[in-house]
Amino acid sequence: MLAIQGGRVYTMTGAGVLEGGVIIVDQDRVADVGVGLPIPPGCEVVDARHKHICPGFIDAHCHLGLGEEVYRVEGDDINETSEPVTPHLRALDGINLWDLGFSDAVRGGVTRVLVMPGSANVVGGQAALLKTWAPHRPDMVYRHPWGLKAALGENPKRVYAAQNKAPRTRMASAALLRETLFAAAKHQDKKEGREKEEFRLAPIVKVLRKEMPLLVHVHRADDIMTALRIRDEFDIDLVIQHGTEAFLVADEIARRGVKVALGPLLVNRAKVELKEVSLRNALRLKAAGVSFCLITDHPVIPVQYLNVCAALAVREGLDEKDALEAITCNAAAVLGMQDELGTIGKGKKADLVIFSHHPLEAMARAEMVMVDGRFWGD
């Protein structure tokens, strides 16, 4: 058992911010949190006076370990461009858990990441939810599979037009996605309860059963509307990835209760689809009632700067509390992990970061990082 006492605790719950708070950690869980709590006998105590303690940050969209640091060719496993529909691929099989980026993530206070294939394919493969550190590296795998990646818009068009293959238009991309979902629905009707799922269609069947969401890469408003139509047609759980122009159709997103993994925002307008990229987009979605989190899309933005993205959104008008929520509790909700992650509360996973300053300040340094109840380096 361990007690962290004396710090300013950002619970990210209805309890708000606790001055001089006490957090009791038992194994991998928060046993209790409050002010003036008695320290259990024999409990190890961490003095956090004058420090700031928040839940570990969560990056709900990145390619950490798939696009490795240093190894430009040998470590590039983000996109499999041999065919446009590859639901059977698993990001986990391409992730190098020894990639230097994981250490960078921990240093930046990021404790959980959703790693997914890239956006070259209309259906790219299955995502994995990972811890950024564990004493035994294979134990970093937390939930797998955890969502199926898909993509609309410019990327699949560009990749496969160069090979003189479909999709070469947005129509073809949408048709391929519908065709894949339709085939899985037909397969499910025919096979359910009698035979094993066909290997390539099994992940799609999980999406249709709402056992995992469809994570759709979309930037432009028209592509977002296509994703929403497909979501309505097949009654599936959808999470919009990137959503650069989501603010233009925010009413359509909000009324469906669809969530957005927003970003990366700290980038230039490298292609037409990023014409509307702005750090103000977070404020725009908040004002429209859209549930969103902020992402880095690492290596587009290095994963350790997730809180920098949140801080810059504050500079552009987003409330400080909303910005911190966008990389903690809201990120957990986008992942469907709000009962486990993203807040400091009794029974929650003990992912905690002790900062020298407010977590969104430029001077803030993660002095101690706890993942699953163990301090990094233990």
Image: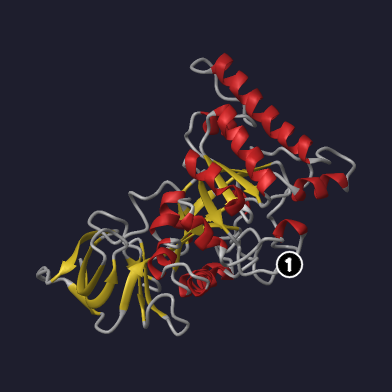
Q: Nearer the viewer, residue 29 or 135?
A: 29
Which residue is drawn at the image coordinates 68% and 55% (left, top)?
A: 78
Q: Residues within 10 Å of mark 1 (few under 14, many from 20)?
A: few
Q: In the image, is 260 to the left or to the right of 274?
A: left
Quadrant for residue 353, please give it: bottom left
Quadrant of the frame with the N terminus: bottom left
Residue 217 spot, x, y in % from top left = 64, 48
Q: Secondary structure at mark 1?
A: loop
Whether residue 73 is visible: yes
The relative height of residue 201 versus residue 81 in the rendered view (above or below) is: above
Q: Nearer the viewer, residue 58 or 317?
A: 317
Q: Can residue 151 be seen here?
A: no
Q: Position of residue 173 (x, y in %)?
A: 75, 38
- Give the side of residue 44 with respect to residue 357, left or right: left
Q: Amino acid at mark 1?
A: Arg
Estimate the x, y position of residue 363 in percent, counting from the top left.
Answer: 45, 85
Left of 263 or right of it: where is 357?
left
Question: Is the residue 290 above or below the residue 165 in the image?
Answer: below
Residue 311 vertical placement versus 206 (above, below): below
> Measured along the vertical axis of the image, is residue 230 above or below residue 278?
above
- Which residue corresponds to the image point at 65% horizontal and 63% vertical from the top-left? 277
What residue is pinned by disc 1?
72
Q: Measuring 73% from the left and 56% from the top, which residue is drawn there?
A: 273
Task: Compare residues 35 and 134 and report the one nearer the observer.
Answer: 35
- Horizontal and vertical percent for residue 3? 20, 71
